Image (cartoon, rainbow, N blue to C red):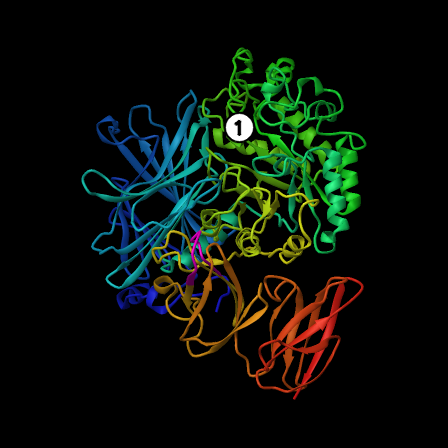
Amino acid sequence: MNISFQGALAEDVKVSQVAQSKNAELTRTSVSVKEESGLLVLQNANAEIKIDLKSGRYSGKDKRTDTVIFKDASFGIDETTGSARWKPESLKITWTKKDDVDEFGKGTTVYVMHTPGPGYDPIKIQTIRLYQEHEFVVFGWGIKNQFKYPVRIKHAEVITMGGLFNGQTVENPRVLRSGAGREANLVEKNWKMSAHNGVMLTYEDKGIRRSLVAGGLKYNEFGRWVEIQEDKRKFKYLSMKCWDPQGKQIEGGKTYYSPDTCYLDFSTSDPFVALEKYGMALRKANNAKPNNYDFPTLCGWMVSTTHLGEGLPINNSPGMVNQLELAKKRGLLKYTPLAVRLEPDFYCAGDQGNSQQGWWDDKHWQKYGPGGIRGPVSKDEIGTGKGSLQKPYETFAKFCGAVSDLGGKTFTYFQANMPSHDFARQHPEWMLNNDISQLHVAHRHSSPLVKFDFTDPGFRDYTLKMWTRLGKDGLDGVKFDYPETAWITTGGFEDKTFTSTSAYREMYDLCRQGLGEDAFIHERIMGAPRQDTTAGLVDLQRVWGDASHFEPEMASRIGLRWYKSRSVYLYYPDGKSFFSHGKPIPTYKRRSFLTLIAFLSGRLEIGSSFSQMTDEMIHDVTRLYPMIRGTRSPRPVDMLLGKKHPEIYDYQVTEGWNQVLLVNNDKDGEKAIKTPLAGSQVKTGSLGLDENASYHVFDFWSQKYVGKLKGSEHLESKLRGGEVAMLSVRKVSAHPQMLSTNRHFMQGMMDTKNVTWDNKKKTLSGQANVVEGEDFVLTVACNGSKVVSCDGATIKKHEGNMDLIDLVFTSDKTKAMPFKLRCK
């Protein structure tokens, strides 16, 4: 079984005998292109694209089931529909092809030239690519501007009004948008959806499972829009386009091939597999390698607020260093580093429009202190040494050095495009349209009328030097707040070749260049553009507004993006407090949000100070680290069963070992959460295990053995409202085997190494990563074997079960401790 795409079942991938016969001449490693009877046919073993070279209409067929998925689609550039559409007097369609290799391997691209007759249309270039080893189709576009003047392209409709469900029945449909930022994404009981980024549709057609994933692939200068809809005539269609509010300017006499592409897979029938393939393709196309936040982050701003935190004034450089000292003293840094984020969130209203923004230097961070929307506590305090950077850490170099010396990481905060008025007055040439004429107009802090121009060569050079300087100072990461302010839809760029999308990306690209590949870049995107346009530049997106509490949809917004999570972005639900109205929240609720965030998100932000957190709270945080690495996140296996929020998340560690999270999303009241161990994952939300095997189940937080279950049974747990169960589910072996540890919520995945059974020597051996001063407990199921002795650990009976033992490791130093358990 492929551990990346577990759970695909035969009933979900039926292929007709007719299709198998027709595909006989096409091998898995071939792409065919031919013209016959006025039709251009591009095909491999999975998909066929057929273009009418007279009309330009085209269709897509699933070769595996010999089924037309869409037909009579058109290709267009900046076109409208209906009576407003200008049809060219004549149209000549020609084509060429190219065989080559790109990041996905060997493939063939056809270039279809749509040359109009007299008029004002440029020559439109349609590109379609198939691969030898992949199911998906890649759509692209270009323009040959045959005129002497520039043309500006805002919309490239790579698929327009492709007719769907031809000769099919659509039963039990489900759709899911490919969400970004704060955007909600829930599975809907429907086949219709319009969405940014992408859409997944799955349904049954006369007992055959069909799925379709359409969305953006390579991002550079345009966003994506996908529609699976029905018009007034009840015509059901698929449309997909690249779009940008400003558009791309192509000079006269120039040919432009857009780097932006679109993805379509209608051959992979299992919707979980289809989405996971899409996520990995999105990662590869954008060279996305989001950095792993293998540490918690303390948010100085949240702790300092009264409505979300404690009202403790730590949001300054000495305050944050002090919190790191407390964290170290209380033992956190034995398990993980701690990032401290200083947020210089001074706003325009605090000093007649003046702030740190644009200056971005120690002098202005010393001058202005954090103070929210209204500025500091008193305007008289501006410039009195009570700013964000204070002595003895009055420079970022000193602040970062102190944090690094303690074993921490330094993060800070930028307002994306909210210039200080005095900076704009000094550098009007670096503002949009070179215009500062509305500096006098009062405005909301997040709606400035004068903005930076991130396309201006001089400002770009200045900004890059600033990021390079901060990188040398030791800055590890940055949060971009109000990034919507950098989404410019009205133009005014110094460099006219930029689009709204590429100008927005430029802000992050300059940061990445200056701070380096290892820097942690955070996009707090609440409004437009809630898109995947920053893939490959940004590490982290936030899915919720300011909120120190936790609720179910925070988890589902992250969990239902599992196919992109960790592979393209990390997602998180804002900082979380361990207190509510000054009182500690119940232990089980604290462990619930910690587990959900660690399992689904991989990034924990803390909104409680280390002077207030109890030892038990800190202990629970340490159970999350090191964070899960790699490109996979747990599947929401019950997402297609009609629930508003998933209740079952499954992560396959190895063949025969799954980590499973059950969650009761009801706020109040006990509820039994259950899932079948075996069966169709799509139809039943099962774990996709072997119904003929048996499985040990062990609960992490209670450190209790749940029992041995047959593969034909259900995994079930009664949970209080908001409670989770983190369970290790392991196929029963014929010899002793590891079941769990007490050190890490992944129960052996992150805190042990090379645990193996030697059947000849009758030994179970491996390594335990032991932290100084803490007993490390590794629980073993003896499976009927008799234990003789153990080198490296003390043997104890596990409470409540005679066939389980605990291996207990102790050390006065943090180290990997080998062990060898002898049995007979």
Magenta stretch: includes residue 490? no
Residue 13 visible here: no
Residue 782 visible here: yes
Would residue 315 be found to the left or right of residue 726 on screen? right
**SS at circle 1:** helix
Task: Name the residue: 28% across, 63% down.
Answer: 208
Specify few, some or many for label 1: CA neighbours under 10 Å numbering under 14, 14-19, or 20 or more.
Answer: many
Q: Nearer the viewer, residue 804 or 613?
A: 613
Q: Amino acid at mark 1?
A: Ala
Please tell me whether the stretch drawn in magenta is mainly helix, strand or loop.
Answer: loop
Task: Name the residue: 59% across, 46% down.
Answer: 583
User: Which residue is disc 1 drawn over?
Assistant: 486
Which region of the structure is painted magenta? 662-672
Compared with 101, 743 (above or below) is below
- x, y percent for residue 202: 33, 55
Residue 249 picture quarter: top left
Q: Nearer the viewer, residue 663 or 733?
A: 663
Residue 638 picture quarter: bottom left
Task: Name the residue: 62% across, 23% down.
Answer: 375
- x, y percent for residue 167: 20, 55
